[in-house]
Image (cartoon, rainbow, N blue to C red):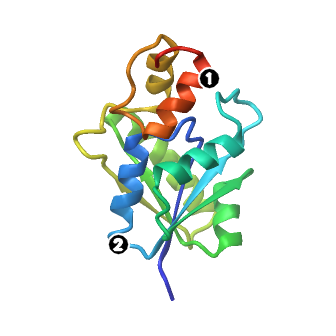
Amino acid sequence: MPTVALYAGSFDPITNGHTDLVRRSLAFVDRVVVAVATNASKQPLFAVAERMELISAAMGGEPRVDVRQFGGLLVDFARAEGIRMVIRGLRAVSDFEYEYQMALMNRHLAPEVETVFMIPSLETTHVSSSLVREVARFGGDVSTLVHPDVAAALRRKYGNGG
C-alpha cells in the first residue's frame, strides 16, 4: 500500500518554501496530496481555483503530487482520502506553539492520523505567503521566492512589477 502524506494550507500564494517541503516529502512518501483550504473567514488574494493552478504549475507536473480543495476539519478530509500522515512546516520557533496545539487537537479527533513536522531549507526559512504578497503589492521582486508563474500572477493581481 502506498504511503500518502497530506500537506494542507491556504497557499495564497504557494512559495518556494512550500514546494521545497513537498519535494522533500516525496523522499519518504509515495504521494503527497496538497490540499488547498477554503476558509470563509479569510479574504484570499487568489481564488481557490487560481491557487490550485499555481500549485500545479509550481510543482512542474510532478505525477506524485495531487492538488485538491477541502473545507472543514483537516482530519475529516484526511480520513475521507484514507491519509494517515499530515506534513506541517515549522519556519520558526514562533510557529511551533500553534502547530503543536493543532497536532494535539488533530490527534484527539483522529488518533490514526499522525503529524510530521518538517524544517524548511535554509534558503526558504524566511519565505511566507504573507511576506511574498506584501513585497509584490509594493512592486518588489519576488522572483527568487516563488515559481515564475506565481510571480506573473502576482504582477497581474497588483498591476505592477512585483
Q: Secondary structure at mark 2?
A: loop
Percent across and percent down for residue 56 are 55, 54
Percent across and percent down for residue 3 are 47, 78
In the image, farthest residue toward the top: 138
Percent across and percent down for residue 159 are 59, 15
Q: Secondary structure at mark 1?
A: helix
Query: Which label's residue is closer to the chain start, 1 or 2?
Result: 2
In the rendered view, tell whether residue 94 sits above or below residue 117.
above
> Which one is nearer the viewer's eye here, 19 or 114?
19
In the image, farthest residue toward the right: 40
- Provide the residue designation for mark 2: 28
In the image, farthest residue toward the bottom: 1
In the rendered view, tell whether residue 156 sits above or below residue 49.
above
> Which one is nearer the viewer's eye here, 112 or 136?
136
Give the crowd class for mark 2: few <14, some 14-19, many >=20 residues within 10 Å. few
In the image, farthest residue toward the left: 122
| Residue at figure coordinates x 47%, y 16% from the top left | 161
Q: Quadrant of residue 132?
A: top left
Q: How many marks?
A: 2
Q: Amino acid at mark 1?
A: Lys
- Provide the residue designation for mark 1: 157
Q: Amino acid at mark 2?
A: Phe
